Image: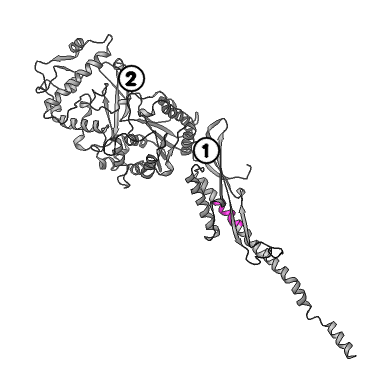
Amino acid sequence: MKLNNQLIKKVADDSGAVTVMFAFVFPALIVFYSLAMDGANFNSKRARLMDSINQSVLAIALTDNRNATVEDVSYNKSVMRKYISYYLGDRVVLSDNDLKIKVNAVKRAGNNAILDYVDYSAASSLVNIKTRILPYARNIGGSGFSPEVTISADSNAGIIRKTMNVINKGTDFLFVIDFSSSMRGARLNLVKKILDAFVKEALPVNDDNVKNTIGMVPYSIGTPVTVSSKNFRGGAQLGCSFAARLKPEYQVDYAYWYNKNMRSYPYANYKLAAYDADYYRHIFHQYIVGYSYTPILTLSAMRTRFCIKNGNSGRTVGRYPYSCETEPEIGIFDKASMHSKKFIDEYERFAALINKANRHYNIVNIDTIDVEGTLAGDYLFNDGAVTTFTHLYATSVNRPFAYMCDAASSYTASKFSDPKGQPSFHVIELTRDVEELSKIQDMTMHGTGYTDSVNGLLRAVPVIAKGVNEKKVIIMLTDGEESGTTSSGPLALRNKLIGSKNDGMNLCSVIKKGLVDYSGGVTNSAEIYYLSLVNDSNRMRFWADNCVGTDKSIVASNYKDLMEVLLAIAQDGSLSYINKGD
């Protein structure tokens, strides 16, 4: 009986049932919590990864460098890395292989040179994400996560489309174009083709909403301009210009001195200077004036018509045997005295200017320019900074400034009397007139042209300052280094005006700031771009570091590249997220 009672008691006792059941259920609970909590952690990280990709691809699209260079790819990946670290913490380790950026540039239908839109997409993977609760479930044959998990965000995480809009924001575009000898031929033809296409894009026909203006400043040594004056034969005269303030000792009256040449400096006295000037006037009348007639005037006939024979002549007298003059109002001699008082008073200053100009190629050079006066206040930002003088229609040996605007004409004597004559290239002021802008298509250069980009840039400032739009863009187009050396010529001037990091003396900083400050509140943005048809890393780096910035110093050597660059400069573009496959 006692044995039966104990058996019944044991059978009826269930106090260990839960323990047995829990022993079976507990591992399953661990797996469940691992799946739930680790899974939630991984999903959270993946969501943050996708958010970081979304934001980073937007930032990359705003930069819009299109993975064009190795440096661009590296920059874009660094942007991705920073966004991912921000969203997921600094302890996330990413290799370049974990970061992928894809760029798809689509051209306009029917025109492979014009971009329609650019799609940016990005993807990334995070490897070695630790499983926290049950890291070894898989290792022991159970259900759960591996000790380390890889999470990914593919290109569906963020696709940004940058659509290139019509150029309709009010912008003043000024092209500063190198007309040096090396640009002659294929390169100049390429520039003309590009400008024609750009004008059509920026100034569409019959669209009154477009407020853009375009201008052009072709330059070599000096900048030719058209003038309304005629010479005594009725031929159109040529104008030559520069923009800068000269030191007082080099300031002269060009209206008087433009046709007088003196090549021996310094002069012991005014008579020696007058003899040289008289000699060159005789040469001019012999080979230009006399040859402009049909039939050509003989030397005797030319002297009879335009010269007087001097009884006393020679260097000590200050007269050539024949004094020839067709502009007596600005002559070397006058009726009251043997030599003009103006000549006597100013010849030393003018001879010094000739000497400096011919040594450095340009009137504006490291010796003659008043840097502080040129860059001070609003001086550069109006036409008062521009000096325009009559360019003597003669070969370089007969002109006082041998290199100034030399490439502007062939100096054919028969054209001296042409009333329709004009420089072979010249300034085109800002305009919306497509026909006026088309004049660039007929422009060319003659003789030997040098590169003087800084003087071209200086001359451009008063032109673009007259623009009335909220944005101003100067686009320099060239193919080579400045002429001269580090101690003379355009190269020395470039280093002096642009090589300084000091914002108070750096020409580019002054220009960009002044175009906004002195616009009367109209302009809020001013940019300078330096585009080269030839890759010269040192030159490109100089302009990037000292003037325009890395993103605005660009090499583009063919039509496609140039067009893409110009449209990227001009078009604002709009950004939008799109779905994969759109």
Q: Nearer the viewer, residue 320 or 209?
A: 320
Label 2's element?
loop
| Residue drawn at 16 percent across, 23 percent down | 276
Mark 2 and 1 residues: CB-CB less than 8 Å, in contact? no
Residue 97 image offset from top left, x and y in percent = 56, 51
Residue 297 image offset from top left, x and y in percent = 24, 10
State the residue lying farthest toward the top.
295
Chief secondary structure of the magenta portion: helix
Q: Quadrant of the C terminus?
A: top right
Number of callouts: 2
First along the sequence among labels 2 and 1: 1
**In the rendered structure, which amino acid carries the disc numbered 1?**
Asn
Q: Quadrant of the N terminus?
A: bottom right
Label 1's element?
loop
Residue range of the region highlighted in magenta in the rendering: 46-55
Q: Nearer the viewer, residue 151 or 331?
A: 151
Q: Which residue is mark 2?
A: 421
Relative to 288, residue 242 above or below: below
Residue 432 within the segment the image draws in magenta: no
**In the rendered structure, which amino acid carries the disc numbered 2?**
Gly
State the residue lying farthest toward the right.
1
Q: Which mark is residue 165?
A: 1
Residue 53 within the segment the image draws in magenta: yes
Query: Would you say residue 69 is visible in this rendering?
Result: yes
Relative to 560, residue 498 above or below: below
Cα gap from disc 2 to disc 1, whole angstroms: 41 Å
- Which quadrant of the figure has residue 343? top left
Asked whether, in this view, residue 249 is left or right of residue 111, the answer is left
Q: Nearer the viewer, residue 21 or 414?
A: 21
Mark 2 Cα within 10 Å, few/some/many (few <14, many 20+)? some
| Residue drawn at 22 percent across, 10 percent down | 298
Q: Which mark is residue 124?
A: none
